[in-house]
Image (cartoon, grey):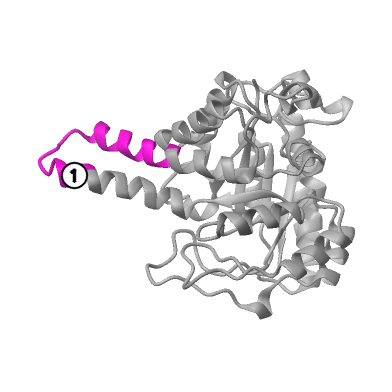
Amino acid sequence: MALVSMKEMLEDAKRHGYAIGAFNVLNIESLQGILEAAVELESPVIVNIAEVHFDYVDMEAMAPVVQRAAQLAPIPVALHLDHGLSLQTIVRAIRCGFTSVMYDGSEYPLEENIRRTRQIVEICHSVGVTVEAELGQVTGGEGGSKEGTVAEPSLFTDPQEAAIFVEETGVDALAVAIGTVHGLYKGEPKLDFDRLAEIARRLDIPLVLHGGTGVSDEDFKRAIQLGICKVNFYTQTSIAAVNRIKERLRREPDLIKFPELLLEAKIGIKETVKRQIQVFGSVGMCDRPNPLCSGCRACQLGRSGFTEEREKIQAEPTATIPDEELVEIISRVTASVLREIG
């Protein structure tokens, strides 16, 4: 089927009490591992391409590959820009046919984060693209260091600010900082479940957990019960891929067949993704009486997440946006920039 709307995916997860895994792709093998795992477990899945990984993966080249793979997969797949840091990157992702983007303005003060995020929501919603944002800061970096990182409580999401932020920006999903970190955690993560419960009480949109590596199965399940509907999970899949390659080379130090090592990496990623899908509770969500893949409008229409009648644009293999839509986007961006510089 065609790529589907992450908004409708997460609303289904929120309604039925499970979470959808969002896994980063860097090449075709990582994509294959993720999709094979999701297909075998009949689970919806979110494929992330992160701006921090642009040194390793060409977004414009990889996006059509994901779109074609999604067309061949019998499950709902969303293509998501992870941690987009600028308007330019967001527009590039829209142009590539992403069904959702995350704008990360968490480094800015609240008012500036609101202003920048609201601008991006306006642009994205005009072409039916879902927007995730972050409030508070999940520290660390993708992959992280071997020593690990510790969460900083002073950077956790404030529930009252979260309510203001969502009201003023109109975002579709919010990534919250409650004790996880990007990359490896130094010690054992201690999630602030009381904070999460209060945020969920104040908001009526799906919540997102970044920095999933190191979190226990029990903590994941409790967080999902309290409102987490999407979990970003990368570092452990990377470790699994590397470990499979190391083990193969330990057994066969003279191996020179590069494709064999890529296959090992794919297997490591697939095994890790399957395990996390089971923890997140999304197994079989495509094989129930009212599954997401036949119940939501995106799946019924086989289109790329456009929710208004005037925006029924069929997703093509290249997933390009018509020129008139792109002109509208660029016009909005230009007007916003001109307002900024006075």
Q: Horizontal placement of 318 versus 26: left or right?
A: right
Q: Horizontal placement of 199 versus 4: left or right?
A: right
Kindly indicate the quadrant of the structure image that contains residue 68: top right
Q: Is residue 258 magenta?
A: yes
What x and y, as percent, mark residue 74?
60, 20
The majority secondary structure of the magenta stretch comes to: helix
Quadrant for the C terminus, please: bottom right
Look at the image and tell me whether residue 274 can be seen. Answer: yes
Q: Total marks drawn?
A: 1
Magenta segment: 248-270
Q: Is residue 113 magenta?
A: no
Residue beneath disc 1: 249
Q: Secondary structure at mark 1?
A: helix
Question: Residue furthest toward the front?
Answer: 218
> Which amino acid type is shown beneath numbered disc 1?
Leu
Kindly indicate the quadrant of the structure image that contains residue 304: top right
Q: Horizontal placement of 69 versus 258: left or right?
A: right
Q: Looking at the picture, does residue 94 appear above or below residue 322?
A: below
Q: Looking at the picture, does residue 183 appear above or below residue 305?
A: below
The residue that appears at 75% across and 31% down in the rendered structure is: 305
The residue that appears at 60% across and 44% down in the rendered structure is: 21
Look at the image and tell me whether residue 48 can be seen. Answer: no
Q: Looking at the picture, does residue 140 appear above or below residue 22?
A: below
